[in-house]
Image (spheres, grey):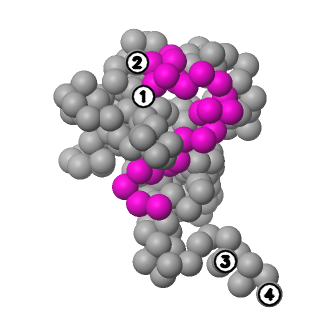
Amino acid sequence: MIRTQDIEAEFNTQLKRISDLSIREKVIETWCKASQEGGWKSIEELRELPFTVVTDPQGISLLQHTKAATEGALALAKIQMETISAFPYVDLDILMAGALLHDINKVVTFERDEKNSFRKKEGPSVNAPAFPGLKIARETGLPDDIIGVIEYECRKAVGNPPNVEAILIHHADMTTFDTMIFFNREERSCKDIHTDSRS
Ligand SMILES: [Fe+2]
């Protein structure tokens, strides 16, 4: 069973940036419930989930991707708030909570296949309009702005973004995804590229 303290420890740095304790608790609760519904029995098992099943994830896990996208969204917000006087107000609680939960649907809808790899479950209960991860987030009572971010991501950012936070999260998210596409196209792994750049 994945416990509150497992998720707290995993996302400690990012969770601490959510000032509203009620939102922080609901983010943790959503991760715990989604993990339970997904059938993941331990934090070790959860750490094995890839961040994507549509391309080679290059060994990048969903938890690593979530942290990278969350920190990336924060960096995008901060630099623009610091340098662009007309930049719209960004609510950091919405940004952090939305980013930490932007892929929560994957926690419920990914499963192991016969080869012990991962795939997406099939059927109407895991696709639109069901989105079971989104449903769990709604049931915890998270604010509408955060639910809007998760729904926007569940719909693959098609349509109008619900708020400025969703735009920042989407671009941070796509940065991690598009680099994977590039690495796969080049048939070079992230590790090779790191090694090359250091040599
Ligand atoms: Fe993502």
- Going by the image, does 190 lie left or right of 113? right
Residue plotted at (42% across, 40% down): 113
Residue 84 position, x and y percent, is 53, 62
- Residue labelled with disc 4: 199
Residue 172 in sight here: yes
Q: Amino acid at mark 4?
A: Ser
Q: Secondary structure at mark 1?
A: helix
Residue 151 position, x and y percent, is 32, 34
Q: Secondary structure at mark 4?
A: loop
Q: Are marks 1 and 2 in contact (CB under 8 Å)?
A: yes
Is the residue marked by circle 4 packed among few (<14), some (14-19), or many (20+) residues within 10 Å? few
The residue segment tinted magenta is 33-56
Residue plotted at (34% across, 24% down): 132
User: Which label sits in the foreground, 4 or 3?
Assistant: 3
- Residue labelled with disc 2: 136
Nearer-N-terminus badge (4/2): 2
- Residue labelled with disc 1: 108
Is the residue marked by circle 3 packed among few (<14), some (14-19), or many (20+) residues within 10 Å? few
Q: Are marks 3 and 1 in contact (CB under 8 Å)?
A: no
- Residue labelled with disc 3: 192
195 in the magenta segment: no
Q: What's the CA distance linking mark 4 and mark 1?
A: 41 Å
Residue plotted at (34% across, 20% down): 135
Nearer-N-terminus badge (2/3): 2
